Image (cartoon, grey):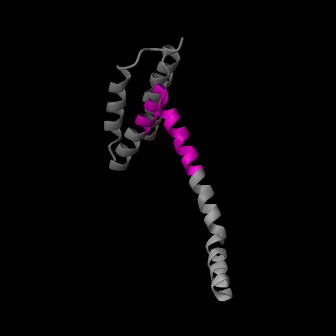
Amino acid sequence: MKKLIMAATICIATLTIVPAHADEEVDQLNDYLALAEQYIDLAKRPEAAVFFAVEGIVEIHEARGEMAKATELLTSMLEKFPEKSAERNIIRFQLRDLHAEMGDANAALAQLQSVIEDNR
């Protein structure tokens, strides 16, 4: 009986010992979940949703080497938003970056001028 109790005690003690890295993994998972919740809350805001969409469009077209196609899509998106909107500003700043990357400084500058004019 003593041996059985001792064996059970050892088993219980062994099961309750958690490797040190397991605590770190739990902390990382909790951090990830908290970040995911913040991301979801942020994405519910219209301007944030546009930002994420614009970033995705640019990232995909950059990977394909289709910078001109990305600028076409973003330019067509401008028509969907009224002047003086955060969404238009987001799109125009991304267009500025694309034009600058493609070496078209005049078009990049024109986007910045449009931001200023849209927000007067």
Taking the spot 66% from the left edge, 72% from the top edge, the residue there is: 17
Note whether residue 13 is visible: yes
Between 34 and 17, the one nearer to me in the picture:
17
Taking the spot 36% from the left edge, 45% from the top edge, the residue there is: 60
Relative to 21, say whether 94 is above or below. above
- Name the chief secondary structure element in magenta: helix
Magenta segment, which residues?
31-55
**Percent from the top left, x then y, of residue 84?**
49, 15
- Quarter occupied by residue 73: top left
Taking the spot 38% from the left edge, 22% from the top edge, the residue there is: 78
- Quarter occupied by residue 103: top left
Residue 120 inside the magenta-drawn segment: no
Taking the spot 44% from the left edge, 38% from the top edge, the residue there is: 55
Q: In which quarter of the image is the N terminus?
A: bottom right
Residue 50 inside the magenta-drawn segment: yes
**Percent from the top left, x then y, of residue 72?**
32, 31
Q: In this view, does 104 lie to the left or right of 24?
A: left
Between 112 and 7, the one nearer to me in the picture:
7
Instruction: Residue at the far top: name it.
Output: 120
Q: Quadrant of the C terminus?
A: top right
